[in-house]
Amino acid sequence: MNKVTLIGPFTQAITMDNLPPKGPVSDDHLQIIEHAGILVSGEVIEAVGTFRELKSLTPHVQPVQGETVVFPGLIDVHTHLCWAGNRARDYAMRLRGESYLEIARQGGGIWSTVTKTREAGSDELAALLVKRAERLLLQGTTTVEVKSGYGLDAASELKMLTSIRMAGENTQADLVPTCLAAHIKPKDFNGSAREYLDFVLREILPLVKSGKLSNRVDIYVDEGAFGAEDALYYLNAAGHMGFDLVVHADQFSGGGVSIAVATGAVSADHLESSTDDDIRLIAASNVIPVALPGASLGLGAAFAPARKLLDAGASLAIASDWNPGSAPMGNLMLQAAVLGMYEKLTMAETLAAITLRAASALRLNDRGVLKPRMLADFIAFPCSDYREILYNQGEMLPEIVWKSGKKLVSNLHVFKGYS
């Protein structure tokens, strides 16, 4: 039987409990427990309440010193963390005014990363991924989605997914793999886009399924990637194989949202080019919009219309899109804070988008909220008021990180904000 331990006291606990799954959220809706404690048994939360009340339930206490605000572990639902090489040359070209698509036509872009990733061994890829995941843990991200998509042939895609599995065994962060073999049509594939998708359906996805390497499939729908008709065909086929579906939608051009809705995708990610009609369509569906402010910052492009999405009644998750090309930063809290300011999101809406609503975008119903029977993933920031976290725009790191009830990280010299 697991030992029950009381962790605390925390100045505040922001539970994220009892918030609506869709639509706007007022800061007044946040459940805030003052002088709080969290009762943990093994990997799960037993209770959340005042430290004084919970102290009578167990003799085992893990003390927390100083003023701290505790919050669910962050969940990053869209990353490309498995890659080799870098794209600093691409970044310099963008600063000269060349577009993402122009850079790709000159040998940069996704294909340059594909080349480097194909050359790397699975051990190297796993080690690089572990290093990135550990950096995210320091920032408070305890669950990370990771895509393939820089292999684009059967052996390399399977190598990437195997590397993600290997990395998951060597980091405390939970890694959620997604097969993005339909990232772009590879330059060395002799055939049409539809023929390449047929190849993926025939030669890659059955091995992904039988090897239990991923239960999620993504496709990039846009200019320079795959068209709407081919994407609809591919996603319907992948769905019939039992995969959850995700769409890279409306980054540079439209059409992706309608595909996501038509196929019952779990989420539609990007949405920088989504129209008012797209917003109404996705709000009337169960598809979760995922904003990727890191890509907007990396490309100097518009942000996803987060405010309009929420006001229309849609959900909203925010993810980092950490990748070597368009979004090389990876700091989820910083990106969420910036998006919140530009799109006028309440703090509750921003925080929900990187916790409980993000969990829904991965179909994980065991995290993102501090309440009984949930996974004991939580982070403590060195402040006395939860509003200071977003106010400091990613500069304030969590002082302590707990993953599945285990204390992992103690940042002893974290930035504590300006007085």
Image (cartoon, rainbow, N blue to C red):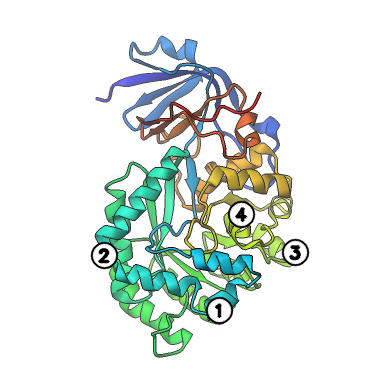
Tell me if residue 216 comes above or below residue 46 in the rendering: below
Residue behind mark 1: 224
Find numbered disc 4 in the image and state the secondary structure of the residue it sits on: helix
Considering the numbered disc 3 on the image, is that residue within a helix, a strand or a loop? helix
Q: Quadrant of the C terminus?
A: top right
- In x, y percent, where is residue 77? 49, 52
Mark 1: amino acid: Gly
Crowding at mark 3 (Cα within 10 Å: few <14, some 14-19, many 20+): few
Question: What separation in Å lies between label 1 and label 3 (alpha carbons)?
Answer: 24 Å
Q: Secondary structure at mark 2?
A: loop
Marks 2 and 1, how far apart in space? 28 Å
Q: Check if mark 2's residue and mark 3's residue have beta carbons within 8 Å.
A: no
- Work out whether mark 2 precedes mark 3 in sequence or the reverse, and give the earlier one: 2
The residue tagged 4 is 293
Locate residue 354, reporting x and y percent.
Answer: 55, 44
* Residue where numbered disc 2 is placed: 121
SS for dot 1: loop
Q: Residue 115's image quarter?
A: bottom left
Residue found 39% across the figure and 13% down from its top: 57
Report how far apart the C-alphas of labels 3 and 4 lie in the structure: 19 Å
Residue found 55% across the figure and 79% down from its top: 224
Name the residue carrying label 3. 276
Residue 266 vs residue 177, the one in the foreground: 177
Label 4 to label 1: alpha-carbon separation: 21 Å
Q: Quadrant of residue 201?
A: bottom left
Work out whether 132 lies above or below 295: above
